Image (spheres, rainbow, N blue to C red):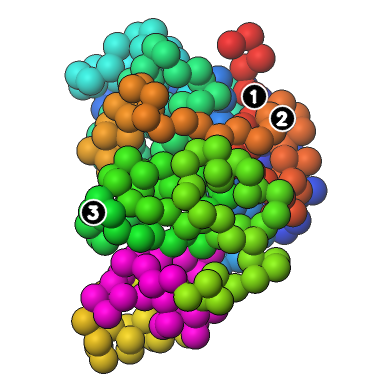
């Protein structure tokens, strides 16, 4: 089968298309014919080994010392089940599914084997969602759910999302609107019209102003990229508000914990854990049309280098989809 291989850490050009052995499912696994994958910022970070300094040693041990232990990258996929292990009960041959491969990766290939339950999360694809749309849901959606649930968003509350124009933020904005919040979305100029179109009540162009200059006080600030000005966070968060830190550097984590210890504010850091319950909840909202996928560009598998370059440029609006099977 065709697959994109990352033999060592480095720039996008390190990625190579190769013929590799087609995997065989274990007793608790399904073999998925992959139809669509995505390129996320996280995929690019793993490829170039770009992690906060305090995670460096653990990340090297986890992902691989000189290069990715799992050389086929990609964390999101949609496709069709071609084979099932004898112990599998949730799926059958021919089921259309989507999900996340987690840190096991492997979505940049024509086939992948995943356990029906465990560290990876897969579920049935609704018939009214395309494979393109379904592939964009898992990573961004589960991450947005993980953080926003911690803040227990209520109707009428004010929420600010910094870095709202990517795969996490576009679902985050829509979730907050679903829960009845008033949402301010912060990102660059080219993404503001899209953010308005998915429900953001207010938008802020960070290249022209800081959100704190508006003098608005928020019940929750979801800082997806971990770059919101710290002075602005402190001035703009209610006395019992939530600071949700999606990219916890040592400095930002220490400041968040110190702020929480000296006030009634709550700091939430760390990373999201793949959660089947959250994915099913998101699936129902997408199936009902409450949430909509935001897709910027599509690339064939053979153009994965260009796809990675585009994601790293910071211009990506929503999601970038990889066409693995051109027939679907």
Element under disc 3: loop
How far, Cα to Cα, is label 1 from label 2? 6 Å
Task: Between label 1 and label 3, give the one nearer the viewer.
Answer: 3
Q: Are marks 1 and 2 in contact (CB under 8 Å)?
A: yes
What residue range appears in magenta?
216-242
Image quarter hosting the N terminus: top right
| Residue of label 1 | 323
| Residue of label 3 | 154
Element under disc 2: strand
Answer yes or no: is residue 185 visible.
yes
Q: Residue at x 60, y 41 (%)?
A: 194
Q: Earlier in the sequence, mark 1 or mark 2?
A: 2
**Image height of 256 relative to 183, above or below:** below
Q: Are marks 2 and 3 in contact (CB under 8 Å)?
A: no
| Residue of label 2 | 299
Image position of 318 (left or right of 298) = left
Element under disc 1: strand
Residue 105: percent from left, percent from top = 49, 42
Residue 150: percent from left, percent from top = 25, 60
Dot 1 crowding, Cα within 10 Å, few <14, some 14–19, many 20+: many
Image position of 29 (left or right of 58) = left
């Amino acid at each position: 089968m065709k697959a994109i291989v990352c033999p060592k850490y480095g720039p996008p050009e390190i990625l190579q298309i190769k013929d590799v052995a087609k995997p065989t499912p274990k007793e608790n696994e399904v073999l998925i014919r992959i139809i669509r994958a995505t390129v996320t910022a996280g995929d690019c970070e793993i490829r170039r080994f770009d992690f906060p300094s305090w995670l460096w040693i653990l990340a090297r041990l986890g992902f691989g010392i000189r290069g990715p232990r799992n050389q086929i990258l990609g964390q999101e996929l949609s496709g069709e089940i071609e084979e099932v292990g004898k112990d599998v009960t949730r799926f059958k041959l021919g089921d259309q599914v989507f999900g996340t491969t987690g840190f096991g990766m492997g979505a940049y290939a024509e086939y992948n084997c995943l356990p029906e339950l465990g560290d990876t999360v897969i579920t049935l694809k609704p018939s009214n969602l395309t494979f393109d749309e379904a592939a964009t849901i898992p990573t961004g959606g589960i991450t947005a759910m993980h953080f926003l649930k911690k803040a227990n968003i209520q109707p009428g509350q004010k929420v600010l999302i910094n870095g709202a124009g990517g795969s996490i933020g576009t679902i985050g904005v829509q979730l907050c609107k679903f829960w009845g919040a008033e949402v301010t979305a912060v990102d660059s100029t080219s993404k503001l019209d899209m953010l308005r179109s998915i429900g953001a009540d207010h938008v802020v162009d960070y290249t022209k102003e800081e959100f704190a200059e508006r003098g608005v006080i928020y019940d929750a600030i979801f800082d997806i990229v971990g770059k919101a000005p710290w002075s602005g966070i402190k001035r703009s968060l209610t006395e019992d508000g939530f600071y949700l830190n999606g990219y916890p550097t040592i400095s930002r984590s220490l400041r968040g914990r110190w702020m929480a210890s000296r006030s009634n504010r709550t700091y939430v850091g760390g990373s999201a854990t793949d959660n089947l319950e959250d994915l099913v909840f998101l699936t129902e909202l997408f199936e009902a049309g409450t949430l909509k996928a935001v897709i910027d560009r599509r690339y064939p598998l053979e153009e994965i280098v260009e796809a990675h370059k585009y994601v790293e440029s910071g211009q990506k609006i929503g999601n970038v989809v990889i066409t693995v099977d051109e027939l679907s």
